[in-house]
Amino acid sequence: MRIHVRALQAGAMLIGGILLIATVVRSQAPAGSAGQVWEYSSVSGRPISNQTTGTPGKYQYISSATICYASPMDCRIETVSTTVASPNGGGRALMMATAKLGEDGWELTAAVEGKGDVSDRVLYFRRLKSGAK
């Protein structure tokens, strides 16, 4: 008889634990996650700059990045540029463009880097579309 009582108690505790976990997990799910509509963008650029401006001995390097705001039919382009003191500062515009998207509510979802030291880096972002249900 005691074995049956203990089995019933263990079963009741197991079911209670499962229900508690299910309640906690459900409460952490994003509200209204069904039917979310995302918009996407990317930032691309080079971590090392080979573009220069100025005169010999007083060169400044140009760091630039391109933001693409994607749509089903096109990509709206925005360029972010700044001058840096050395070619190794080429990634500054990448970070400026990334910070701009972050301030606008975009979240980084993936990053891809080409082969070699001076290859393009592409950072992919998403955010919930304004007015989406």
Image (spheres, rainbow, N blue to C red):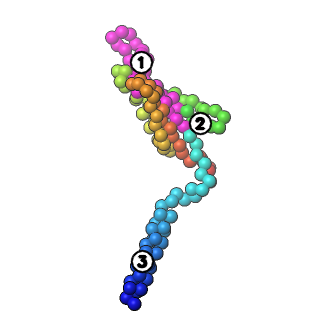
Position of the C terminus by quadrant: bottom right
Of residues 42 and 96, the one nearer the viewer is 42
Secondary structure state at the residue bearing disc 1: loop
Secondary structure state at the residue bearing disc 3: helix
Which residue does the numbered mark 3 point to in the structure image? 13
Residues at circles 1 and 2 in contact by the CB criterion of under 8 Å? no
Residue at image position (48%, 61%) is 28
Q: Residues within 10 Å of mark 3 (few under 14, many from 20)?
A: few
Q: CA distance from mark 1 to mark 2?
A: 28 Å
First in residue order: circle 1 vs circle 3: 3
Which residue does the numbered mark 2 point to in the structure image? 70
Q: Residue 30, percent across and down?
A: 52, 57
First in residue order: circle 1 vs circle 2: 1
Q: Quadrant of residue 57?
A: top left
In reply to whether residue 123 is colored magenta, the answer given is no
Q: Residues within 10 Å of mark 2 (few under 14, many from 20)?
A: some
Residue 66's disc is none
Residue at image position (41%, 86%) is 4
The region drawn magenta spans 41-67
Seen in the picture, residue 1 relative to 42 is either above or below; the reply is below
Amino acid type at image mark 1: Asn
Which residue is situated farthest in the top direction here? 56
